[in-house]
Image (spheres, rainbow, N blue to C red):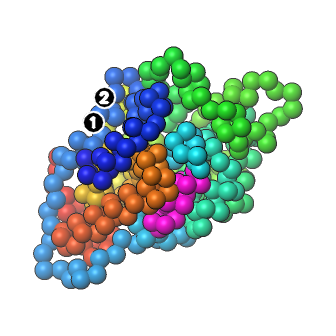
Amino acid sequence: MHEQLQRLRDDAERVVDPDMWSYLNRGSGDQRTVTEAHDAWDRYRLRPRVLRDVSHVSTELPLFGGVWRTPIGIAPTAFHAVLHPEGEVATATGAAAAGAPMVLSSRSTRRIEDVAAAVDGPWWFQVYLMRERAITAALIERAAAAGATAMVLTADTPYVGHRARTPALARPLPLGDDQALINVRDHFPEGVEDYWELIDQRADLSLGDIAWVADVCELPVIVKGVLRGDEALACIDAGADAIWVSNHGGRQLDRAISTAAALPDVVTAVGDSVPVIVDGGVRDGFDALTALALGASAVMLGRPVMWALAAEGADGVAGILDELTGELRHAMGLAGAACLGDLDPSLVSGR
């Protein structure tokens, strides 16, 4: 693992409650998918070009009307306040300092509007289609009004994957409702006693829900959780504006293939029709370079950002994003790529 990232992980483990640490880092089932994630990227090798002008290397990413300084961004993860008192506001502050994309989770522990103010630039909002559809619509509308430039519809969670818990983890985290429900509580119907049942994910998701999300907000819709080329095409036919290759950090279907293995199939199927985003097991700039060369437009981090947040707050988030971006920029120069557009599959040798 990257040296700085390992240090942040070690520091985070020392300060995070052991039950929380287990919740954050465990995968589902026997954890096959989560443990294979980084090794799958590491099996690729690079085929650099030479005699190219790389006196200036740019990692700038234009996407959906936003421009970021780096294609390495922050995937949506829940309940940041468990790891740092400022929660998602600290994460957003770090993302803004690094000029990195950020996706805010529906399960944020800080108000959407406060996080948006801290981002101070383009950002995306992650959507779970909840049992009470009106609550989902209200959150989408709020995020759009606060400045979100795209919606990320998570499609791989009709049920929560089975993960081992300690007895202390009742729901799955011991957050007060003032934090865990901070964004949804304003939209509960009157007379409801079991709020948590209302906001569970729906198990009857369909391709038609892509258009439903778009109709609510009139923003691009990115479908997250795709691991097959044929499924990517079906989503695009149904109105998806981008595809996000993800296995939910190994937290849903155990033994699902790695995103490193799934990415080439999805990119081949999609071609240039829509952007492709990927997360899962990316731990250094070389992993990011590999993913971008294989056809991803952006590479998102989950657990590494959470380790940085727990260890050093906003500064830690900005620091690890800057570190990996610098490593990516250096590797691009050595590979003969002066910009992201110079990256293509010919730079990567098979696993």
Estimate the x, y position of residue 276 in percent, counting from the top left: 41, 56
Give the distance between the C-alpha atoms of the residues marked 2 and 1, in whole angstroms: 6 Å
Residue 112 horizontal side relative to residue 18, left or right = right
- Residue 283 on the magenta span: no
Write the start and end of the magenta stretch as one range: 88-103
Give residue 126's position: percent from left, percent from top: 58, 48
Q: Left or right of 187: which side holds 316?
A: left
Residue 202 x, y percent position in the rendering: 62, 31
Residue 286 spot, x, y in % from top left: 24, 57
The amino acid sitting under disc 2 is Arg
| Visible residue check, residue 305 | no
Instruction: For the residues labelled 2 and 1, say whether their Cβ atoms are less than 8 Å apart.
Output: yes
Residue on which the image places disc 1: 36
Task: Please give the name of the residue rendered at 43% of the width and 33% of the height, measured from the top-left corner.
Answer: 21
Return the residue nearer the eye: 245 or 16.
16
Q: Residue at point 49% right, 52% down?
A: 313
Give the overall secondary structure of the magenta segment.
helix
Residue indicated by mark 2: 32
Question: Which of the 4 image quadrants contains residue 261?
Answer: top left
Q: Nearer the viewer, residue 155 or 48?
A: 48
Q: Residue furthest top?
A: 167
Q: Residue at x 59, y 25 (%)?
A: 171
